[in-house]
Structures are given as structure tokens and as C-alpha cells.
Amino acid sequence: MFNDFSSPIRYCLTRRSAKPRDLIAPGPDAGQIQQILTAAMRTPDHGKLAPWRFVIIGADQREALAERLTTAYRAEKPEAGRLEIEAMAQFAHQAPALVVALSSPAEDSKIPLWEQELSAGAACMNLLHAATALGFGGGWLTGWPTYNSDVRDAFGHAPEKIAGFLFLGTPSRPLEERPRPDYDERVSVWDI
């Protein structure tokens, strides 16, 4: 087990992300993906707008995604070398399961855009928690593909933005702990 499920707070204190390149089969099946995304949608959502969407990228669609990424990368960076192009193709082929999360704001709403974007981020975090609860590892990546409009247009359209690529599978090795922020540096008590 790669997280401590002995108690809910222990789980929260030991939760870790997995590196997508280290995730192997088995990944979640269609029913588990549905459970994971249903849990992801149980997120804070001021105004009940559901300002997010999810796009499941099937195993049979990974090569098309790789082609989309490399074509968009070449268009934006015509001087790109072979290794950069290969990295874009490899990005699309990581982990057994892939979900693209989109921030889909309701522009005509009185709810501030920032709150809607925060809700999309919370939905991504809920997705990772749900995947972990089912025994899988998950990694949430952004990087260049997240900010390219041609890549975004493969999944949606402006004003939507890619909130991230969520890779899911079974960790091939124990998850490594990373340095965490120092409590006293990040937390203070308000003193009027």
C-alpha cells in the first residue's frame, strides 16, 4: 500500500502523488473511472455551476493525442529538436488511464471567475483522492500542453482552460516522500 489508510487523518498526512511515468497496469477500469469522476464532482462549488469538465482519453486514443501534442509543439516551436518532440509524444503515453480536466467557467455568472477556477482545482484534487482510495496512484501534470490553445481546442474551447492532465495507474515502486513546507513558515495566527 502506498498510503496509510489506518485513519482518515493519517491518510491525509501521508498522501502522495505518483509520477505518471512510474504508473503501470492495472489502471482503473471504466466503472472505477466513473466512481473516481463522480467523487471528483463532489467538490466545493459556489453557485452550483459545475465549472469544470472531464475528458477521458482511452488507450486507443493515446497515439492521436501524441500526434496532436507534437503537431502543436512543432507549430509553436519550429526550432524544437528530436528530444523535445519525443518528450511530447511520451507525455501522451504515460500511465494506463488519463483524464483531462478542464476549467469551464460560467462567464455570465455573478460568481467570480477565481472561485470557479478554485472549484476546478478542488475537483482535480478530489479525483486524486478517489483514485487513491481505490488503490491506484495518480499524478496531476500541467506543463506546456496545458497552456497551448491548439491542445486545449482538442478538448474544448475558450474560455475553457486545461486544469491538468490526471494520470492514473498502479505505482511500479513505492512512492517517494518529498520535502514539505515548514508549518511555521506557512501558518500564522492573525493578531489584530
Image (cartoon, rainbow, N blue to C red):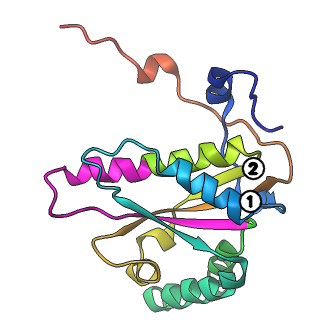
Going by the image, does 84 lie left or right of 44?
Answer: right
- Spot the residue most to the front: 31
Nearer to us: label 2 or label 1 = 1
In the rendered view of the protein, which quadrant contains the N terminus? top right
The disc, 2 or 1, on the residue closer to the chain's N-terminal end is 1
Picture coordinates of residue 85, whole percent (x, y): 63, 84
The residues tagged by marks 2 and 1 sit, at their Cα atoms, a distance apart of 7 Å
Q: Is there any visible trace of residue 79 in the rendered image?
A: no
Quick one: label 2, few (<14), some, or many (20+) residues within 10 Å? many
Please tell me which residue is depicted at 27% across the width and 44% down the height of the picture.
Answer: 46
The residue that disc 1 covers is: 28
The residue type indicated by label 1 comes to: Pro
Q: Are the residues flagged by discs 2 and 1 in contact, CB closer than 8 Å?
A: yes
Relative to 85, residue 20 above or below: above
Relative placement, left or right, of 51 versus 111 is right
Please report the residue visible at 29 percent of the width from the left and 49 percent of the height from the top: 48
At 80% from the left and 54% from the top, the residue drawn is 170
Q: Can residue 48 be seen in this view?
A: yes
**Percent x, y of residue 115:** 27, 47
Element under disc 1: loop
Front residue of 165 and 50 = 50
Magenta segment boundaries in residue numbering: 97-121
* Residue identifier under label 2: 136
Graded by Cα atoms within 10 Å as few (under 14), some (14 to 19) or many (20 or more), the crowding at tag 1 reads many
| Quadrant of residue 81 within the rendered picture | bottom right
Indicate the position of residue 107 as horizontal and vertical percent values: 19, 64
Mark 2: which secondary structure?
A: loop
79 horizontally vs 20: left or right = left
Examine the rendered structure and indicate whether residue 70 appears above or below residue 174: below
Residue 173 versus residue 107 in the image, above or below: above
